[in-house]
Every structure is written in C-alpha cells, then in structure tokens.
Image: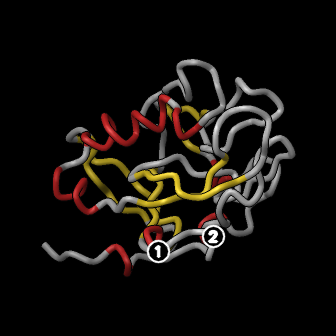
Amino acid sequence: MAYVTLSSKAIGSTIKLKVNGSAKDFIVVHQGKPSSVYDDSCNGTWLLMKDIYENRKWHSSNTNDYANSTIHSYLNSTFLNLFESNIKNAIKQAKLPYRKGSGTSTTVTSGLSAKIFLLSATETSFSFSSMPSGEGAELAYFKGCADNSSDSKRVAYLNGSAAGWWLRSPYCNYFNRA
C-alpha cells in the first residue's frame, strides 16, 4: 500500500481516518499556519470531519465559555481516544485564538490548548455581529464562502440529513448561548 504525507494533500481533498473502528471522511481545510495570529503549534495540515459524528451539547451548564465547555473537554478526551493510537499520537497540540470566559465580550485572546477543536466563525468565513471577529483567520477551504449566509462548504450531515453544527465562537448577545 502506498502512503502519502498529509502535507502533500490539496485543499478540499478528502482522506479517511478510522474513528471508533469505522472509516470517516475528513476534508483538508488548510495547509500550514493560517496567519501570524496563531503560534507555530498550528503549522500543519488542518482536517475537518466531513459530517457530524454525533449530536452533543456545547456546554452542560448553558454558558458560552468554550475553554471550559463540555464539548471542548469531550473532544480532547473521549473523542480523541476513538482514534487509533498512531493517529492520536500524530495529532498536534495546538494553541488557538478564542473568546475567553463567558458573557457578552467579543474580545479574542490566544492560547487555548487543544488537539481536537471546533472551528471558529472566522476560520469558516462566517461573520455574524453577535460573535467575536478575528477569532483566528479564514482557512483556505472556506475562502470565497458567503460571509453571513449559508454556503455549500459549510453543510454537514447527521444520519443523512443536513444539520446545524457547532463553532467554538460563542453567541455574545447572551451569556448562555453558543
């Protein structure tokens, strides 16, 4: 079997990785460090699972604090452990820009440590007045997407039906919404 390095894969190409023993499609959404907003830990191949793995709550206590959210904890423990050990060991620990804490602030800071994470509104080229802006940089795959409406590159499916999917960007008009 021939192997290719992820760094040689084109933006938009799909690879398969096993999650809990089943092959799942992942889209190459960026190669390299997206911008100087990120530190060198983010320099690599960025993958996005093509479809929704399961429906989960963003935060069990209904606050919009991503760093302390249920989903962030789940992704970096239970979900990470669903990958085969060689894949799990190859996933880099990244430090990401994010909106720190809960509440209505839209101020972005850096340094959220994660191996697996939800993308931000900025990274997916989505702009909405009640979300932080500048939460990273637009990833190559999403360049040219509609800024504040639906776009085919932002459609994911859960059990065969198009469904909404979470971003790490909180909804900042209220402290209890993501």
Residue 121 relative to residue 173: left or right? left
> Is 121 located above or below residue 58 in the figure?
below
Report whether 119 appears left or right of 113. Answer: right
In this rendering, position of residue 126 left or right of residue 50:
right
What residue is at 64 percent from the left and 59 percent from the top? 123
According to the picture, the residue beneath numbered tag 1 turns out to be 40
Q: Residue furthest bottom?
A: 8
The C terminus, quarter of image: top right
Q: Position of residue 141 (x, y in %)?
A: 59, 67
Could you tell me residue 95's position as x and y percent?
Answer: 48, 60
On residue 28, which mark appears? Answer: none
SS assignment at label 2: loop
Residue furthest toward the top?
61
Q: Is residue 144 above or below residue 119?
A: below
Q: Residue at x 34, y 73 (%)?
A: 6
Residue kind at label 1, given as amino acid type: Asp
Q: Looking at the rendering, in which quadrant would you find the N terminus? A: bottom left
Question: Mark 2 = which residue?
Answer: 37
Viewer-side residue, 85 vs 96: 96
Taking 172 as reference, is 2 above or below it?
below
Give the side of residue 4 with respect to residue 131, left or right.
Answer: left
Disc 2 crowd, CA 10 A, few/some/many (<14, 14-19, 20+): some
Q: Nearer the viewer, residue 128 or 3?
A: 128
